[in-house]
Amino acid sequence: MPGQIMNGEAFPRLVIAGLSGDAGKTFVSIGVALAARAAGCRVRAFKKGPDYIDAAWLRWASDDVVRNLDTFLMGTAGAVASFFRHALDGRSASAARDEALNLIEGNRGLFDGADVAGTDSTAVLAKALAAPVVLVLNVRKMTRTAAACVRGCQALDPDLALAGVILNQVAGERHESVVRQAIERECGIPVLGAIPRLDDARLPGRHLGLITPAEHPAIEEAGRVALDAVRQHVNVGALIEAARAAGPAECPPQAMWRANDSSRKNAFRDVGAGPTIGYVCDSAFSFYYPENLEALAARGATLVPISSLSGEPLPGHLDALYIGGGFPETHANALSANVSLRTSIRAGAKAGLPIYAECGGLMLLARSVIWQGRRHDMADVLPIDVEVGSRPQGHGYVRLRVDRDNPFFGGGQELRGHEFHYSRIVGAGDRVPGDLPTACAIERGTGCGGGRDGIVVGNVWASYTHLHALGAPAWADGLVAAATKAAGR
C-alpha cells in the first residue's frame, strides 16, 4: 500500500505517557533522551499537544528541533504526516551505536482529551502513529493499586499498545518489589524502570508550567539529575527495543519527503525574495512553533530575530513584526526600561507596520502590565491594561470564527488554536472594554472576554489565541501578504 511503512524498525518510535499531569513525563523524557544520546543513539523528540515549555526542554535534551503533534490543531492526518516527515529513519543505522529513537512525550493523562470520549488524547495519537506506549506511574503511597491503574488502562482501550511501565516516586527496594511484582503478574507487561524519590528540585515550576530552559538557573545540573536518575534506574536499552518493535503504520504520502537540515538546525535565518519579517525572540518571548517560522520562510520572507531585552529599537527595515508568547511579566522591569524598543513599536504601529501578536505579544502591546501589584509601562499600541493574576484566565483549545475585517484573515474562516494565560484585560470582566474592535467570535475558549478575541487596531492584530501553521495555513499567507503590501511589492 503506498505510504505504508512495512518495516516496523523503519521509524523506531515510543510514547512516554502518564495517568495525569505531574506524573513525571517530562523528567523521564528528558532523562531518556539524554541517556540514549550518551549511549550513542540519535534522538528526535516530539511533544503531544500544544505545549511550548515541555517542547523547549525536549529540544535542549535532544539537541534538535522538537515538533508538536496535536490532532485538534492540525487534524490526525496532519499530526501523523508531521511525525513521519521529521522522524529519524532507523533503517539507516549502521551500527549499534547509531540507533535511532523517536521519542514522543504525551500530555495530561493518557486518555484525557477534548471531551468525555477522550478525543485528541495521547492514546488517540499513539494509535494513529502505531506507537508503543510506556506509562510513567507515580506510585507514591500505593502498592498493588498501581496494578489496578495499569489494568484499567488496558481494559479501557485494549487496542492501545502498552509496552511497559516506569515507576516514579518509589520509596525503597521493598516498595519497588511489591509494585513491580503486582504489575507484572496482574497486567502481563514489564516494569522497565523504578525512579526513587529525589530531593533535588529538578525542574522547578511556576504559573504556565515549568521554568523554561533559557531561564533555568542551573540547567546543566537539572539535566545531570535527570540523566543520572534514568541511567541508574531505567532500562534504556529495553525502551529502545520497544521503540524498534513498533509495527507498521499508515504514513500519509505527503510525509514521505525529508525536511533538510537547515529547517531543523539553523536559527531560521532563511533569506527569501519576499518581505522582511521580524520576530521577537528571547527569554521573555520564546513561544514559537518551528513550523510557523518555517511557513513564513517558505513563502519567501526573510526572518529577523529581535531581542526585546537588548535595549535596542526595532530594526528600521522591517515590513512586518511577529510577537509570540512567553513570560513578559517576569521580564516586566527590563521591558519597561527598554524605552527605545517600546517607542519604536508604537511608532511602527502608527505608521501602519503590520504586527501580529499572540498572548505575551498582546501584553507587550498594551499600555501597561500589572504584575505582583506593580504597574509596568509597555508599548501603548493597544488602549488596554493587562493584569497577571494567580489563576488561569483562559486554558485549553480555542475555536474562532473570523467575522470582522482585519489585516490577516478573510471573513468566515475558522481558526483552531489554544490559550493558556494568567493575564486578563483590566476591567474587561465578561466583555471587551469599550468599543475596542475585535475580529473573531469565540466558539470555544475565553480569549479577550465577552466571547471575542483578536483585537484589531490599524494593521495590528493581538489575541490570546496561539495558532499553529499546520492547522492554520492561512495565517502565514495572511502575514506574508500584509508584509508584502506594506513593503510596496
Image (cartoon, helix red, strand yellow):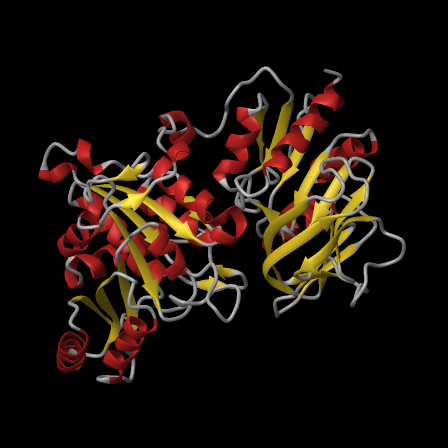
Please state, as top left, top right, bottom left or bottom right, where the N terminus lies in the image. Answer: top left
Q: Is residue 437 left or right of residue 39?
A: right
Please identify the quarter of the rendering in which residue 323 is found: top right
Residue toward you, 260 or 346? 260
Q: Name the residue: 41% across, 32% down.
A: 254
Q: Return the x and y of residue 200 as percentages of the image width and height.
A: 31, 66
Q: Return the x and y of residue 159 as percentages of the image width and height.
A: 29, 63
Q: Is residue 473 left or right of residue 387?
A: left
Residue toward you, 72 or 55? 72
Please state, as top left, top right, bottom left or bottom right, where the C terminus lies in the image. Answer: top right
Q: Is residue 376 left or right of residue 218?
A: right
Q: Work out whether 179 lies above or below 445.
A: below
Q: Name the residue: 54% across, 31% down.
A: 295
Q: Name the residue: 71% across, 50% down.
A: 401
Q: Name the residue: 22% across, 44% down.
A: 37
Residue toward you, 473 or 303? 473
Q: Work out whether 374 lies above or below 358.
A: below
* Residue found at the far left of this picture: 95
Q: Return the x and y of residue 307 as percentages of the image width and height.
A: 58, 36
Q: How many marks?
A: 0
Q: Is residue 319 visible?
A: no
Q: Return the x and y of residue 204 as percentages of the image width and height.
A: 42, 63
Q: Is residue 192 visible?
A: yes
* Residue found at the far front of this picture: 1
Q: Is residue 107 left or right of residue 1?
A: right
